[in-house]
Amino acid sequence: MGMWRGLRVAFIVGSLFMILLIIVYWDDVGGFNLYPLQDPKHNPLDYYSQPETSPGSLHSLSTATVLPSSLLSLPTTGGSTPPIPEQLEVGSKAERYREKEREEKEGERREEHEEEEGEWRHAEERRQEERKQSIVSVCSGEGSVEFPGKTRTFDQIPNRELDHLIVDDTHQIIYCYVPKVACTNWKRVMVVLSQSLVSPSSGKPYTDPEAVPPDLVHNSSLHLTFAKFWRHYGSLSRHLMALKLQHYTKFLFVRDPFVRLISAFRNKFGRPNEDFYRQFGSVMLHRYGNLSGSLPETAAQAFAAGIKPSFQQFITYLLDPETEKDATFNEHWRQVYRLCHPCQVQYDFIGKLETLETDSEQLLRILGVDHLLHFPTGARNRTAASWERDWFAGIPIEMRRELYKLYEPDFELFGYPKPDSVLHR
């Protein structure tokens, strides 16, 4: 009995010892947790915000809470705490919302721009219709103004009077140039489109209108005009003209007639110009200058001596019946209706110097060449309408009214108001 009792005591003590070992072992591996319960607000990710452990303190990781592998694989930036999945989802939703908001705003801006552009183009089309209707009204006899050649047909116009109609067959364009109305720059455009002038530096046709030398564009050999058709096509010339007038896009640019006259005078007689001095200036000085003796032979000598035509002498020359009989009623002051024949040629586009930039942009788009070139933005004639009163101040009122009658068809045809401030003061 004594031995049996001893065995039982030993068994019980051994069992207790084994149970104690098992408890200690399971606690180490995390099977049991004998430590006090943690705060439910405790974030297991606080582990990431702890200072980096040193190699000697790696034992602390043994008690860290085990995290899902999806969280352990999240990228970190610097030492900041990475977002949990709920935060990622909220962030991506916010980003999608902001992106949608940006797209909506961009769409609204595009719609506003398209609407503004549509209104602008509609206004341009309206303006063109008004300009064309003004010509139709005058040519159809609705107005009271009469002028030579108003009722004749195109075939009745002599070839020599068609020398301002420049033709570009490649782009199917007809341009009637009017001197002192941006014609130098528009001739540059026509030279580039027709590739009729080669650059000496590249050996190829010019592609930039601004690069074309302005003194060369007035060389008549560069441009094919209706006046040259007879030499090229003989008896077929009129038939070809009619076909091109029917199918090509026809345009011209005009300007306030009195302002154009001031510009012509300033350009040709306000500074030495040998050709205009000999052909016109000397005539004005002889007829209306009350000068005794002979005139200087050159414009430079005349200017040096203070001898040059005045604006009044210029106007007197224009009103002189003898001038109309001359074949030298020069293109720089010849009326537009005599240069471009608006009653016989139905122009598709009428531009004005007063709206040169917007009209040029619109026209290049209509012609379908706006991707090829831009209208030159260089120096332009700065003679302003506000100058009229000062320039005409020394001209007798009767002469002003006679001059208006001479240019009244251009005022009426192209919708320029009657210059009452000039005619009644």
Image (tube, rainbow, N blue to C red):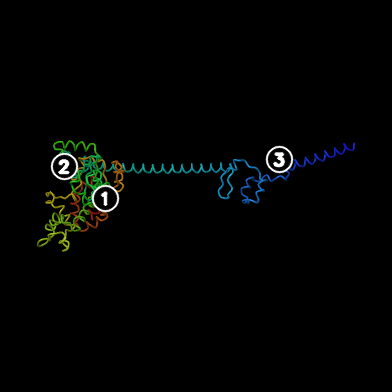
Q: Position of residue 335 (x, y in %)?
A: 19, 48
Q: CA distance from mark 3 to mark 2?
A: 109 Å
Q: Position of residue 188 (x, y in %)?
A: 24, 48
Q: Callout 1, which amino acid?
A: Ala
Q: Residues within 10 Å of mark 1 (few under 14, many from 20)?
A: few
Indicate which disc, 1 or 2, sits on the residue closer to the N terminus: 1
Residue hosting label 1? 211
41 on left or right of 139: right
Asked if one can make out residue 163 in the rendered structure from this viewpoint, the answer is yes
Q: Residue at x 82, y 41 (%)?
A: 13
Q: Residue furthest front?
A: 3
Indicate which disc, 3 or 2, sits on the residue closer to the N terminus: 3
Q: CA distance from mark 1 to mark 2?
A: 27 Å
Asked if one can make out residue 256 in the rendered structure from this viewpoint, the answer is no
Q: Residues within 10 Å of mark 2 (few under 14, many from 20)?
A: some
101 on left or right of 266: right
Q: Position of residue 214 (x, y in %)?
A: 23, 51
